[in-house]
């Protein structure tokens, strides 16, 4: 069994984590000051949640009625013979009216947790998000790649993740500004200038020493660190990457594991609340809460402020279901909606809800027309942005943004998908994902000019993104 | 870089060839390649490709059981190339079926049967593989509304790729829709054999609005008329799925080369030789890929074995060799977790224990759990795209999992009954000099040529407790179990050992 940091300190007689740190790893403790604004300076947190598999946007933000002059509920009714959500089931989740089409909209009943946040003014729903590149082949991989890099044109200057480019711009090689909950680094966090940790559970993040010979432990530790530092200094880039990760991992393995007990002891009711939700996703989100609590408590060497986690299972080709307790899509919505609400309340109780911004995205949406008991791959869908100081400056303005895609049969393309269009005169004009990212970068992440981190593509201004708008309005 | 079959294998090339085509470079195998008699690249390639192929299938009552038997087979096999390719094809034709261990076992046998065979026949067999029929919804592909899942991945992942080496799309969504029609009506029986039901099949006469079964009207070099995979009523039905494959394999890209051949050659080259990101069709690879096709005729014979030989006699393969100690080259590759585990067990001559295949060392973690923590659960690829390779294998969580595996392997447990026996690997009675001990250990682990002098100095520092001890008595139980085992553990945990 791996020893904890406390045991390690006790056994080796060393008092502080700082004493462990190898000389070249934190070569320059003031490095951070050399960089422009970052989340430490802004005292903010950023959480990215990925709905893996292509979430059905139409059964996430759903037409509740045709409205004054619209036809979207009628079209929805026709396209979703067995997968449609009834008006009575949708009504509790009503979130206002689509400005363009006049369609009253509602959240899926499984997202009741998000509806509660909407009622607080802490939820923005950005409709019709997509990009010009993913829609021709509707491939998970291609589309994910575009969303994660923020680079539909495949420009080789933008192959890292869009969040990764932000981290690389604001942090140095000795820092650990991000944590992904899981066993691997999410591609939107990919970069090679600073360190992102992958942690499944902070409690289990201790270094696995062989504890049989306690007198040998500090020699083992020093040797591992020495080898990491040698690799950090290597010419070979892959080796350097492994060395950086090894060094950051060893350091974090000494500072992060105690966070779990600390959180459980100090926040027992919230700790239990996540367990009560019964999903792995809720437990993943609790790990983020533990780290934020550690940062807020000033735990040494815990400075991560950007997080990523995901929930899988959204590729609902079959057995998608509607609102039943055992219906697949409903379960998925509950997992995320309930956990995010709990996490928001946890953060509010810690006093950090106004320092928090959560983004929920999926690689694409699903076909308008259902197919059997499920749905095939489709085009644009909604993105959720949650948190922030509500309503004042530097703040999230909860509400509906963008346009509901036109799901009328006559408006669909040959494949039965809604059409991505950037034509300024198009009443159903799509929201380019780069406008969403740009607004986040500019108004939450402190990048004055996000165009340095997001490639514009040329081409037909009706189809491509040639006129960036980093002021979508959901954050100011 | 040219093909160079007659070049003699050098002392750094021989271990490189073994590492990249098998599980590590055990000293006895390196000697075999270096001779005397010394071997040319072509002779070494023939030796490796000529190893006796097995027809193993990992039968098991549960998916975990199938997994463990597969791992055990990799640890034992005398044909590591075959197993490295089964891994490649498992990633390529990534399939998950937790409920039916038998169909996954059968698929694993199929991968082993075709891994060095004819690629076109391979894809036709995959069309009818029960696990694939289940996983990508062919079994749910009905005439009323054809399900596009398999038709899409067949083109995007298994054969053509989304774009060619010039960045032009290889197919359109319309081609996905039309190919989905061909696969309507297929399912599998209780024995796992593919069965065709005419009542569920999309016949042109029943769906006049869908038109004839024409694909590649805009792509593929067939001209605006495209290609009809069922031109007459007699061609319709069960033969359609083979006809579709024949047309896909005739598809040519925007500069006139066979699209499938380039896609597969590029991906295998990335796997074995040069670790570009997994996503193939990168313009930089075009020259070497075309050379491989010219050398192997893979674009006409579809012989995977010939393609692999072309790769491992090419200068581009040896440009990535383990030239000590990793100076300059951008082309080192991260070992897959399963390669890390299997190679290490083979080098240490260790076996997993018990019916659940655990590693001794106090944790008693099952090997499947350890691999899961490292980011690779075989038979459970994260999706049809398989795993992300190279630096994506490396994260803090994955490195801790590798470190835990190394610790469990090398720790001394149970008063001498541990399954780790370093005294069987090195001469503990006569070795006392720290430098000699280090050399012996890195020789066993095949990394002597890959450590810098500075790295060796750090390991000596560990071995001597910062220089306090100038010699070690490895016959002493505690010295051996702490320092010698600790040294093995550190090398296995070191950044250098994660690469090959």
Image: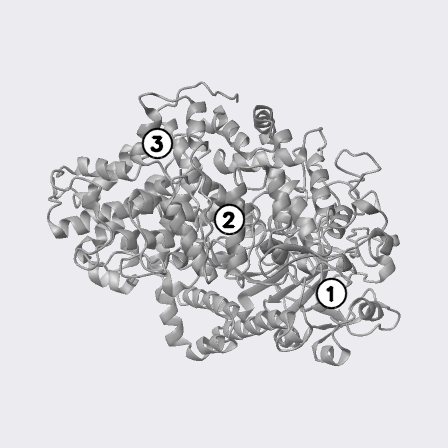
Q: Nearer the viewer, residue A373 or B353?
A: B353
Looking at the picture, does residue B466 appear above or below residue A471? Answer: above
Looking at the image, how many numbered discs can be counted on the residues? 3
The reply, left or right, for residue B436 in relation to residue A442 is left
Instruction: Write the residue at 37% across / 76% down.
Output: A265
Q: Which residue is drawn at the image coordinates 42% and 48% (left, top)?
A: B338
Mark 3, residues whose alpha carbon is within 10 Å: few (<14), some, or many (≥20)?
A: some
Q: Rounded to the nearest whole Å, what is the CA distance between mark 3 and mark 1? A: 58 Å
Can you tell which mark lies on residue A372?
1
How crowded is the residue under tag 2: few (<14 C-alpha within 10 Å), some, or many (20+)? some
**Label 2 sits on residue:** B109
The answer to whether residue A63 of the structure is visible from this angle is yes
> Residue B454 shows which numbered tag?
none
- Name the image quarter holding the C terminus of chain B: top left
Element at badge 2? Answer: helix
Residue A192, visible in the rendered structure: no
Q: Which mark is drawn over residue B325?
A: 3
Earlier residue among tags 2 and 3 = 2
In screen coordinates, is B452 left or right of B240? left
Disc 2 from disc 3: Cα separation? 39 Å
Residue A259 is situated, as x and y percent measured from the top left of the image, at 38, 66
Residue B268 falls in which quadrant of the image?
top right
Looking at the rendered structure, the secondary structure element under dot 3 is: loop
In this rendering, the label closer to the viewer, 2 or 1: 2
Of the pair A266 and B151, the residue shown nearer to us: B151
């Amino acid at each position: 069994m791996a020893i904890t940091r406390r045991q390690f300190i006790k056994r080796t007689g060393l008092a502080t984590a700082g004493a462990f740190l190898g000389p070249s790893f934190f070569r320059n403790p003031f490095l951070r000051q050399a960089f422009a604004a970052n989340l430490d300076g802004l005292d903010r947190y950023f959480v990215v949640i990925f709905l893996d598999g292509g979430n059905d946007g139409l059964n996430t933000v759903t037409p509740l009625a045709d409205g004054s002059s619209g036809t979207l509920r009628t079209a929805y009714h026709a396209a979703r013979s067995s997968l449609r959500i009834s008006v009575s089931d949708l009504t509790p989740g009503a979130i206002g009216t689509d400005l363009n089409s006049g369609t009253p909209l509602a959240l899926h009943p499984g997202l009741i947790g998000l509806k509660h946040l909407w009622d607080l003014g802490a939820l923005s729903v950005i409709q019709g998000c997509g990009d010009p590149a993913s829609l021709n082949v509707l491939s998970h991989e291609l589309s994910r790649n575009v969303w994660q890099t923020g680079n539909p044109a495949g420009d080789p200057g933008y192959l890292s993740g869009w969040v990764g480019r932000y981290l690389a711009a604001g942090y140095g090689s000795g820092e650990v500004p991000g944590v992904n909950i899981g066993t691997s680094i999410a591609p939107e966090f990919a970069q090679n200038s600073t360190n992102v940790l992958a942690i499944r559970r902070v409690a289990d993040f201790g270094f696995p020493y062989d504890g049989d010979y306690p007198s040998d432990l500090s020699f083992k530790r020093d040797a591992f660190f020495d080898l990491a530092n040698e690799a950090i200094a290597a010419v070979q880039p892959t080796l350097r990457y492994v060395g950086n990760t090894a060094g950051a991992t060893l350091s974090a393995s000494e500072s992060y594991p105690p966070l779990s007990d600390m959180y459980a002891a100090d926040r027992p009711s919230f700790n239990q609340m996540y367990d009560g939700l019964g999903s792995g996703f809720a437990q993943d989100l609790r790990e983020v809460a533990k780290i934020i609590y550690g940062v807020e408590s000033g735990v040494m060497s815990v400075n991560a402020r950007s997080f990523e986690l995901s929930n899988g299972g959204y590729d609902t080709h079959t057995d998608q279901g509607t609102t039943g307790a055992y219906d697949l899509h409903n379960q998925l919505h509950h997992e995320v909606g309930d956990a995010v609400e709990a996490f928001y309340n946890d953060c509010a109780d810690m006093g950090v809800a106004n320092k928090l911004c959560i983004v929920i995205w999926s690689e694409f949406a699903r076909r308008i027309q259902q197919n059997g008991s499920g749905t095939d791959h489709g085009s644009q869908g909604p993105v959720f942005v949650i948190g922030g100081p509500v309503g004042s400056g530097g703040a999230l303005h909860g509400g509906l943004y963008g346009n509901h895609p036109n799901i009328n049969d006559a408006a669909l393309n040959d494949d039965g998908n809604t059409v991505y269009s950037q034509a300024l005169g198009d009443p159903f004009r799509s929201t380019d994902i780069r406008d969403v990212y740009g607004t986040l970068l500019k108004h939450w992440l402190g990048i004055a000019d996000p165009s340095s981190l997001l490639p514009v593509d040329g081409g037909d201004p009706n189809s491509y993104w040639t006129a960036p708008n980093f002021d979508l309005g959901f954050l100011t | 870089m040219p093909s160079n079959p007659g070049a003699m294998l050098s002392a750094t090339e021989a271990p490189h060839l073994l590492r990249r085509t098998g599980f590590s470079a055990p000293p006895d195998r390196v000697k075999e390649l270096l001779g005397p008699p010394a071997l040319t690249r072509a002779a070494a390639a023939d030796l490796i490709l000529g190893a006796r192929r097995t027809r193993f299938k990992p039968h098991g009552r549960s998916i975990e059981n199938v997994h463990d038997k597969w791992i055990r087979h990799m640890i034992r096999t005398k044909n590591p190339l075959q197993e490295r390719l089964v891994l490649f094809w498992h990633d390529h034709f990534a399939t998950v079926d937790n409920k039916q261990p038998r169909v996954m076992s059968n698929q694993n046998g199929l991968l082993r049967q075709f891994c060095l065979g004819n690629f076109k026949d391979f894809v036709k067999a995959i069309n009818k593989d029960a696990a694939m029929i289940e996983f990508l919804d062919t079994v749910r592909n009905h005439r009323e509304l054809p399900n596009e899942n398999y038709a899409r991945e067949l083109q995007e992942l298994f054969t053509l790729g989304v774009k060619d080496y010039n960045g032009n799309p290889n197919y359109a969504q319309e081609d996905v829709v039309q190919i989905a029609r061909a696969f309507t009506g297929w399912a599998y029986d209780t024995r796992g054999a593919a069965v065709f039901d005419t009542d569920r099949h999309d016949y042109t006469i029943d769906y006049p609005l869908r038109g004839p079964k024409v694909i590649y009207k805009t792509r593929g070099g067939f001209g605006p008329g495209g290609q009809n995979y069922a031109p007459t009523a007699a061609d319709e039905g069960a033969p359609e799925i083979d006809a579709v494959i024949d047309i896909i394999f005739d598809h040519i890209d925007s500069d006139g080369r066979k699209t499938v051949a380039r896609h597969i050659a590029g991906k295998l080259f990335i796997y074995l030789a040069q670790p570009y990101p997994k996503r193939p069709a990168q313009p930089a690879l075009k020259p070497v890929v075309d050379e491989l096709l010219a050398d192997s005729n893979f674009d006409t014979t579809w012989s995977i074995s010939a393609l692999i030989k072309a790769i491992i006699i090419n200068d581009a393969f040896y440009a990535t060799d383990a030239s000590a100690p990793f100076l300059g080259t951008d082309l080192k590759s991260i070992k897959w977790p399963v390669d890390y585990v299997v190679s290490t067990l083979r080098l240490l001559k260790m076996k997993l224990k018990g019916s659940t295949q655990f590693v001794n060392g106090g944790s008693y973690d099952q090997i499947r759990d350890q691999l899961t923590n490292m980011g690779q659960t075989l038979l459970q690829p994260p999706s049809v795209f398989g795993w992300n390779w190279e630096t994506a294998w490396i994260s803090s969580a994955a490195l801790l999992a590798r470190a835990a595996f190394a610790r469990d392997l090398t720790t001394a447990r149970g008063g001498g009954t541990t399954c780790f026996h370093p005294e069987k690997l090195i001469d503990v009675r006569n070795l006392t000099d720290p430098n000699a001990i280090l050399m012996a250990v890195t020789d066993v682990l095949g990394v002597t040529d890959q450590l810098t002098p500075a790295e060796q100095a750090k390991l000596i520092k560990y071995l001597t407790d910062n220089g306090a001890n100038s010699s070690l008595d490895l016959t002493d139980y505690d010295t051996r179990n702490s320092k010698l085992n600790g040294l093995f553990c550190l090398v296995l945990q070191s950044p250098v050992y994660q690469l090959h």
